[in-house]
Image (cartoon, coloured by chain):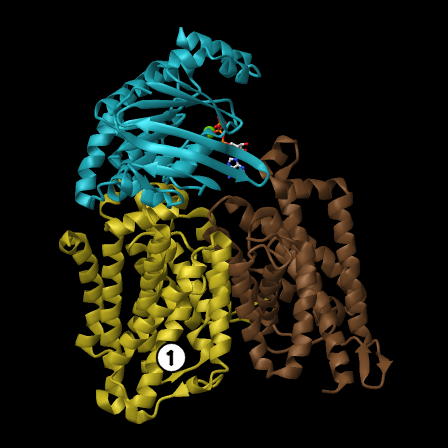
Chain colours: A yellow, B cyan, C brown
Amino acid sequence: MKNLLNPYLWIILLVVGGISVVPILTGDASMREDLFLILMLVVLASSVNIITGYTGYVSFGNIVFFGLGGYFAFYLMQNFETNFVLAALVGGVGASIVAVLIGIPVLRLRGAYFALATIGINEAMRTFVANFDPFGGSVGMFFNYSVYNAYGGAKNALWFAYDGIVVVALATIAASFLIKKSKFGLGLLAIREDQDAAKVLGIDPARAKVIAYTFSAFFPALAGALFFFKNGIIEPDVAFDLLRSIEALVMVMLGGYGTVVGPIVGATVYERITALLITAPSITVLGVSLGFSQLHLAIAGFLLLLIVLFVTAGFVGWLRQRFPRTRRYLE
Amino acid sequence: MTNTASVILAVENVSMRFGGLVALDRVSLTVHEGEIFGIIGPNGAGKTTLFNVINGVYAPHEGRILFRGEDITGMPPFQASRRGIARTHQVVRPLGELTTKENAMVGACFGRENLSLEKSSIVADEILEFVGLAARQDMLAGKLNIAQKKRLEMARALAARPLLLLLDEVLAGLNPQEVAEMLTVIRKIRDQGVTIIMIEHLMHAVMNLSDRVFVLDYGAKIAEGAPQAVSSDPRVIEAYLGDPKMAQRLLEGSA
Amino acid sequence: MNLAVLVSSSIDGLMLGFIYGLAAMGLTLIFGVMRVINLAHGAVITLGMFALYLFSVQLGLNPYLALVLTLFLGLAFGVVMYFISVHRVINAPELTTLLATFSVDLIIVGVGTAIFTTSPFSVNVDLGTYGSGEITVLGTKIVAVLAAILITVALYYFLYRTRIGKSIRAVANNRSAAELMGINTTAMLALSFGLGTMLAMISGGLIATLFTFTILTGDDYQTKSFVIVVIGGLGNPTGALVGGILLGLLEGIATLFMQPSWVPVIEYVAFVLILLLRPNGLFGARA
Ligand SMILES: Nc1ncnc2c1ncn2[C@@H]1O[C@H](COP(=O)(O)OP(=O)(O)OP(=O)(O)O)[C@@H](O)[C@H]1O
Ligand SMILES: [Mg+2]
C-alpha cells in the first residue's frame, strides 16, 4: 500500500485530527458538541461521496445505513449490555451486509431510478422500524442510565463518544483517500463516466458498485452507533431522516463532488452556516417577524441553488478547474 | 484457406435480432493470429453488432464465439477484455472527466495483464507516446477534439495489451493527414503481433491494409477473401449499388 | 366485515385516489418531458394549499374561484421556477437537477415555516353530504373528484389535440429532433414544467378543501406521488392516474385489514419492488 505513505493523506489527517483534539485537550464541552456534529457530517458526506461522487450513483437515502447501524448497536447495548465497540462493529458489519443484499439488485438501476429506489428503501425501513416492536416501534428505544456505567457515567460517555467519532472520521477520510487513489477507485471513476465503456475496458461494474456501496454503508453505520449511543435515545424519524440524507449530498456538492477534501470542507461549511443561521436574531419584514432560525432552511436552499447553478464542481472542484496545477495535490 | 497460422477467433453461425430486425443472420468467420481482417458492408449491415457480439456486449441468439479455442459466447465484455479482446467504439466514448492518461490507465489496469496502477502508468505513457497523445496526457478526455478522441479510443484499447483488437471505423471523420497517421499506427500494431479486425468504410484503407476482407450485407455474409477477389465480386458490387459512390470507391480501392 | 364499511372505505379511497393521481401526473409529466425528478413537488402541493387559503380565507373569495386562481398561479410559478432553477442545468447529471429542485423545496418550506409556522390551517368549505345510511360522501369530495377528472380530460385534450401539446410530446420523445423540426424546445420545456407544477398546485388546492394542512403536509403527498409514478411508470400520465386510484383504493381498504401504520410499509416495499421488477410501471412494457 504505497498510498499509505502519501504525504497528502497525512496532511489531511493531521489537519482534521489536530483540530479534533483541541476540545479533548481543553475540556471544552461546547466545542466538543460542535465538532462531534461536524465530524459526523464529514463521515456521512465522505461516505456517500464514494458511491455518488466516485461512482456516479446518487444514493439519496444513504442515511438508511446510519439508522441501521444506530439501531443494531443500540439494541445490543440496551438488551445484552454489549460493549460499545463490539456493538458498533456489529452495527457496521450488519449495515454492510444489508448494503450488499440491497445493492445487488438496486445497483442495476440507473440514474433517477436508482436515486428513487434508495429513497424508497430508506422510507420502507423507517416505516418498518416504526412498526417493529423489538426496536421499540414508533417510540424507539431509551437507554437505562446503567448502560453508561461501563464508560464512567453519562458525562464521561460523551467524551468517549467524541473520541469514537474522531477515530471513525479519520478512518472514513483515509478510506476515502485510499479508494480514490487505488486501482479500484479508478474503476469506480470509469463507471461514473461511462459504465458501458468501463465494462468493455475490463471492469466488472456490478461487483465494483456493490463494494463501493458497502463502503458507503459501513462508516455511516458506525457514526449512527456513536450518535445514538451519545444521545441515549433512538427513534425512527431521527435515525432514518431523509432530510439529513439529502443534506449530506448537499455538503458533497458544496465541497466538491468526487474529491476527497470536498466533503470535509462541505460538511464543515454547511454545519457552520446552519449553526450561525439558527442562532442569529430575528428580523421584521412588513410587520412579520422572521426568525433566521426559521429561515435557515430557506437560506440553505438559496445557497444550494447558487452552488448547483453556478459552481457545479463545488468549492474544491472549482479550485481544481481554476488552478489546474492544484489537481495533483487536491484530491 | 491456405493460411496455416492458428485460428484466434472463430465465429460460428451467429445470429442476433433486435425485436423483428435481424441484425446478424448466421454469420460465420475465422480470423488467424497476426492478420488484419477487414469487415466492410453498407450502413446498417450489422458490422458494429458483430463486434458487440464478439466482445460480449450482446449475447447472440444463436451460434458460438470461440476465442483461442475457448467458448466465450455470452460472456460479459469485461471477461472478453481480460482474455485479450480490446475494442474501439465507432461513436467515441471518452471517460470525459478523467484525463487522457487516466483513460489509458483504465485500459491498462483492467486489460489482459491486469496491471497495478504503477505499472499501468508506465504502460499508459508508452501508449500515449505511440499514438501521439503524450502532449495531451493531462487534458480532460472530454476536451479533446474528435481526432484525438479517436486516438484515445485506440490508446485505451492498446493499453490493455490485447491479443485481438477490434477497430470500429477508426478512420471515419479524420482528415487525410490524420488518416495517414492512423494507418501508420495500425501497421505498427500489427507488426507487434496483435491480430486486428477492422471495420472500415474507407475502401482504399481496408483494401490496402487487410489480409482478408469480409463483406456483410443485411446481417449476412455475402463475400469473403483476398481484397482483390472481394472487390470484384459481383454480389459485393451489387450490395453497394444503392450507393454508387461507394461502389466506385470499392473498385478504385482495389485498383 | 361490514359490507357497508367496505363500500364506503372503497369509495373514499377511490375519490382520494383521483386527487393523488392528479398530483402524481404533475410529477410524471415533468419527468416524461425532461427527465427531471422534481423534488419540490411536495412543496408545490403545499403552496397550492396555502394559495387556496390566502385567496379564500384571507381575501374572502369563493373557494372554487380561488381554485381557478391557484391553477393559473401554479402555471406561472412553474414557468418561473423552470427558468430560475432548472433551465441552466437541464442537461447536467441527475444529482444536479435533483439538488436544484430540492433547493427550491427548501426555500418554499423555509419561507413558509417562517410565515405560517408549522401549525395547522384549514379552508372551510361545506357542500353537505350525499348518500344514505352508512354510505355517505362529502359534497366537497365529489366536487374535488369532478375537478380532477375535468382537469385530466383538459390536459389530454391539450397534449393530444393541440399544436402546442403535440410539440410538447415531440420534445419529450426526442429533444434534439424536435429542435431540428423548428420547435422552440426551451418554451416547451418551460411550459411542461409549468403544467406539471400547475397539476401539483391544483391538487394541493383540492386537498385543502377536504383536510386541514400544515406547511409540511405536501411532503406526504410527495412520497405518495413517487409511489404512484413508479406504479404507473415514470413519465406516463395515464399510468399516474391509474396508479393514484390504485393507491387510494389500497389505502382505503387496507386500513380495514391492518393497522394503518403498516400501510406505508407496504407502499414503500411495493415501490422498491416495482422499480426493480417493472421499471416501466405495472402497465408498461416489461423491463
Ligand atoms: N441496440 C440496438 N437496438 C435495436 N436495433 C439495433 C441496436 N443496435 C443495432 N441495431 C440495428 O441493427 C442493425 C445493424 O446495426 P449496426 O450498428 O451493427 O450496423 P453497422 O453495419 O455497424 O452500420 P454503420 O456502418 O452505420 O456503423 C441496424 O439496423 C441498427 O439499427
Ligand atoms: Mg457501425
Would you call the spot at circle 1 few (<14 residues within 10 Å), some (14-19), or many (20 or more)?
Answer: many
- The quarter of the rendered structure image containing the N terminus of chain C is bottom right
What residue appears at the point 35 percent right and 23 percent down from the top-left corner? B37
Q: Which residue is mark 1?
A: A71
Find residue A193 and report its horizontal and vertical position in percent. 38, 44
Q: Secondary structure under badge 1?
A: helix
- Image quarter of residue B173: top left
- At x 68%, y 71%, the residue is C248
Query: Residue C275: where, in percent of width, then height?
Result: 53, 60
Above-or-below relation of C243 to C124? above
Kind of residue at disc 1: Tyr
Q: Out of B173 and B214, give the one closest to the viewer.
A: B214
Determine whether, in the image, residue C131 is placed left or right of residue B115.
right
Query: Is residue C152 placed above or below B151 in the rendered structure?
Result: below
Q: Nearer the viewer, residue C141 or B159?
A: B159
Q: In this orientation, does residue B152 appear?
A: no
Report the front residue among A8 and C280. Answer: C280
